Image (spheres, helix red, strand yellow):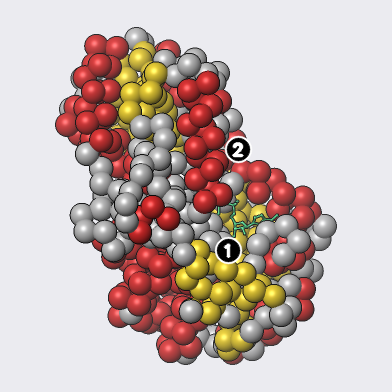
């Protein structure tokens, strides 16, 4: 039985709390690991180790040397791709293809992009006139924020945790990572690679546990933690904001979404189906940027629904060991109950269930896994819970529309503002409509294309702040303006 320990000050160790919890396989429902739960003393040990590292070798390291070390870390992650694939797949039951092609390469890229950027980016400089006409110069200086608490979710564990740790370390901070209780493996494994490449002890620390009353909450309240970067549910973000308020801890939030796809009659329908089959069903719908609302211009509504139905019904359920599987299980029985609750609610509200709406039956080990049917609904009003609330499963509601004004209004009529995707072959329409969607990311004729130099994040209930590229400097550094009289 695998055991996941804490990783504190460069060393793996059991939790002083003496508490552990089980990790269950999403593919089979069987216990696959025991995880050590960090409580107050463990959390304090991790934060104090991170604080000490700021004042030690790491804090004194020249920026170029720090960035070179992170580039070596990216290479070392790449070299251990097979180990990270097995770890991610064990926790999430993702396909090895998804882990190999998306998740692990992004883990390396998330260090590389910020190391390269920080190494080659200059800063702001302003010359000003002065009353005595001798002038003055202003230099915008950046220094590390300090110890950063990183709290990450289970839906893309390694990608999302490194998306935060990469810029945090590139900017000279140290981190204490609290991965989701559902996905401890890759964050723990990364400690080995940190030691292999020579990242000083205490720079990267991993504590395991839950949120309220556990490691997560304790981390957000620790006086030596200077900022919390969090990815997860909106309501969790609200809780963390309250927890972090005492001490005025800065926060960077990437939260939930209820993302629209808009398909105009002039769209390339093959492309529209290819894009939305991914944006609705990839990772079993457990993608914050995924589509749960589809708006289709009326002339092509029936064709679209019929083709999406065919695509959904062609998906093959299975875990990483199931040959040819194209849709996996949800992460946990608890999450499956949440998604099935929405499936029941849709029926109660009178939705037309185009396909799905329940869970598949198997006569093999998959029967113990947390599988649900890929599901498509039509016919519900825009104010229904199915159209307003994030479900985070392999499902979508499809609504017809007649005009641009109507569909823009429907797309924006949400408390979220994370992402959207627009399918049209009309360039001016893509600019016109795309510029009016209230979301952090809008794709045209594509989905989940990610340039890591761009800003990433959501508005309204989808987040606070932007990370990505130089935008990450806003959260991971403290600015000073040095004004020198000439
Ligand atoms: N915007 C994005 O980039 C993005 C990316 C991925 C997932 N998400 C969102 O994440 C959610 C799914 O992930 P999840 O179920 O793990 O989210 P979650 O909010 O339940 O948990 C996320 C993390 O927060 C911790 N946590 C929970 N309560 C806490 C508290 N009170 N204090 C401190 N830590 C706490 C959890 O232990 C976990 O590590 C979805 O809503 C999805 O939309 C958003
Ligand atoms: O499920 C959400 C996925 C988020 C992806 C990113 O944060 C990213 O691509 O940087």
> In terms of depth relative to the viewer, which is nearer, 339 or 368?
368
**Above-or-below relation of 31 to 367:** below
- Residue 141 located left or right of residue 396: right
Task: Point out the image quarter for the C terminus.
Answer: bottom right
- Estimate the x, y position of residue 419 in percent, counting from the top left: 44, 38
The numbered mark, 1 or 2, whose residue comes first in the sequence reads 1
Marks 1, 2: nearer the viewer: 1
Most extreme residue toward the right is: 246
* Residue plotted at (35% across, 15% down): 400
- Estimate the x, y position of residue 151 in percent, counting from the top left: 60, 61
Does mark 1 have its CB less than 8 Å from ligand 1? yes
What residue would you read off at disc 2? Answer: 461
What residue would you read off at disc 1? Answer: 181
- Estimate the x, y position of residue 201 in percent, counting from the top left: 58, 88
- Estimate the x, y position of residue 388 in percent, counting from the top left: 54, 27
**Above-or-below relation of 445 to 193:** above
Q: Badge 2: how crowded within 10 Å, few (<14), some, or many (20+)?
A: many
The answer to whether residue 478 is seen in the rendering is no
């Amino acid at each position: 039985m695998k055991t996941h320990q804490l990783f504190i000050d460069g060393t793996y160790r059991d939790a002083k709390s003496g508490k552990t919890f089980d990790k269950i396989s999403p593919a089979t429902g069987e216990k696959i690991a025991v995880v050590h739960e960090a409580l107050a003393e463990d959390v304090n040990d991790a934060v104090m180790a991170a604080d000490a590292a700021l004042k030690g070798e790491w804090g004194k390291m020249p920026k170029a040397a720090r960035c070179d070390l992170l580039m070596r870390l990216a290479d070392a992650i790449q070299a251990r791709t097979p180990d990270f694939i097995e770890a991610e797949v064990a926790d999430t039951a993702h396909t090895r293809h998804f882990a190999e092609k998306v998740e692990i390469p992004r883990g390396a890229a998330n260090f590389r992009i910020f190391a390269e950027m920080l190494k080659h980016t200059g800063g702001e400089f302003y010359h000003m006139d002065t009353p005595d006409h001798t002038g003055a110069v202003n230099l915008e200086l950046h220094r590390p924020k300090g110890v950063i608490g990183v709290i990450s979710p289970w839906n893309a564990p390694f990608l999302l945790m490194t998306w935060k740790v990469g810029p945090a370390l590139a900017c000279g901070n140290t981190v204490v990572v609290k991965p989701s209780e559902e996905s401890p493996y890759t964050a723990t494994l990364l400690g080995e690679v940190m030691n292999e490449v020579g990242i000083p002890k205490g720079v990267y620390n991993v504590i395991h546990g839950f949120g309220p009353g556990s490691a997560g909450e304790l981390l957000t309240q620790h006086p030596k933690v200077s900022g919390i970067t969090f990815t997860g549910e909106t309501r969790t973000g609200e809780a963390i904001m309250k927890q972090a308020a005492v001490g005025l801890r800065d926060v960077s939030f990437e939260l939930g979404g209820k993302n629209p796809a808009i398909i105009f009659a002039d769209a390339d329908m093959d492309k529209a189906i290819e894009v939305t089959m991914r944006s609705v069903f990839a990772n079993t719908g457990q993608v914050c940027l995924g589509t749960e609302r589809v708006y289709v211009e009326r002339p092509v509504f029936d064709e679209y629904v019929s083709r999406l139905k065919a695509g959904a019904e062609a998906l093959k359920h299975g875990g990483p060991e199931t040959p040819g599987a194209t849709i996996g299980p949800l992460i946990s029985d608890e999450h499956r109950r949440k998604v099935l609750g929405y499936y029941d609610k849709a029926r109660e509200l009178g939705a037309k269930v185009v396909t799905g709406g329940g869970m598949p039956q198997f006569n093999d080990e998959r029967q113990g896994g947390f599988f649900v049917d890929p599901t498509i609904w039509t016919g519900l009003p825009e104010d229904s819970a199915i159209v307003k609330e994030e479900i985070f499963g392999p499902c979508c509601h499809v609504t017809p529309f007649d005009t641009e004004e109507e569909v823009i209004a429907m797309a924006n009529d949400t408390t979220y503002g994370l992402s959207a995707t627009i399918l049209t072959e009309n360039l001016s329409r893509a600019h016109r409509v795309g510029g009016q969607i209230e979301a952090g990311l809008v794709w045209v004729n594509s989905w989940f294309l990610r340039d890591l130099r761009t800003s990433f994040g959501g508005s309204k209930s989808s987040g606070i702040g932007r990370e990505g590229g130089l935008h990450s400097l806003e959260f991971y550094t403290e600015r000073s303006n040095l004004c020198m009289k000439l």
